[in-house]
């Protein structure tokens, strides 16, 4: 089962802890470093390395001409949470990467709210995954 997550949550999560199987995760963020077979992305909570060797990269129709990733691009990554061999830091082996907004081209869709919407998707997914029941009384003033 995939899990939408903030990068900071991935650092706190041991991918082998819950089921003995690697955790599949979805994250979104801005590319801050681009290498030959890897990128680093920042989602506002932390930065993580993404390995792209076995990854399918998809581009929206309006970006088809450029077909290349750049620093500053906003992307969605689906992959497997792993630990890097050298540093034992969490990293992701990407299975799928989708360019959502290119830094090199003007957006034709008005995608300015994608980052904000992603935060709500992750929070909503966490609430349903953990089956938390929100107690509205904790948000009400004491005199009510």
Image (cartoon, rainbow, N blue to C red):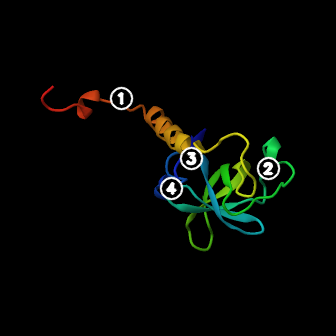
Query: Which residue carries the number 3 mark?
Result: 115
Q: Residue furthest right?
A: 65
Q: How many marks?
A: 4
**Residue at the (73%, 69%) spot, across then down:** 35
Q: Which mark is residue 10?
A: none
| Sooner in the amino-acid sequence: mark 4 or mark 3 | 4
Q: Quadrant of residue 30?
A: bottom right
Q: Badge 2 is on which residue?
A: 56
Q: Taking 144 as reference, is 42 left or right?
A: right
Q: CA distance from mark 4 to mark 1?
A: 25 Å
**Considering the image in quadrants, where does the C terminus appear?**
top left
Q: CA distance from mark 4 to mark 2?
A: 25 Å
The kind of secondary structure element at disc 1 is loop
User: Which of the labelled discs sits on residue 14, or is there none?
Assistant: 4
Q: Residue at x 78, y 43 (%)?
A: 60
Identify the residue shown where x is 81% and y is 44%.
Answer: 62
| Label of residue 133 in the image | 1
Q: CA distance from mark 3 to mark 1?
A: 26 Å
Disc 4 or 1, which lies upstream in sequence?
Answer: 4
Name which of mark 3 and mark 1 comes first in the sequence. 3
Q: Residues within 10 Å of mark 1 (few under 14, many from 20)?
A: few
- Image quarter where the N terminus lies is top right
């Amino acid at each position: 089962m995939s899990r939408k997550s903030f990068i900071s949550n991935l650092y706190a999560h041991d991918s082998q802890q819950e089921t003995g199987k690697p955790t599949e995760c979805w994250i979104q963020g801005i590319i801050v470093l681009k290498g030959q077979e890897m990128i680093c992305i920042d989602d506002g909570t932390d930065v993580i390395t993404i390995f792209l060797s076995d990854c399918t990269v998809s581009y929206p129709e309006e970006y088809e001409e450029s077909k290349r990733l750049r620093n500053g691009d906003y992307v969605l990554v689906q992959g497997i949470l792993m630990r890097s061999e050298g540093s034992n830091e969490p990293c992701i082996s990407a299975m799928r990467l989708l360019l959502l907004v290119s830094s090199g081209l003007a957006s034709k869709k008005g995608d300015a709210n994608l980052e904000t919407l992603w935060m709500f998707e992750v929070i909503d997914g966490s609430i349903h995954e953990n089956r938390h029941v929100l107690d509205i009384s904790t948000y009400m003033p004491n005199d009510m």
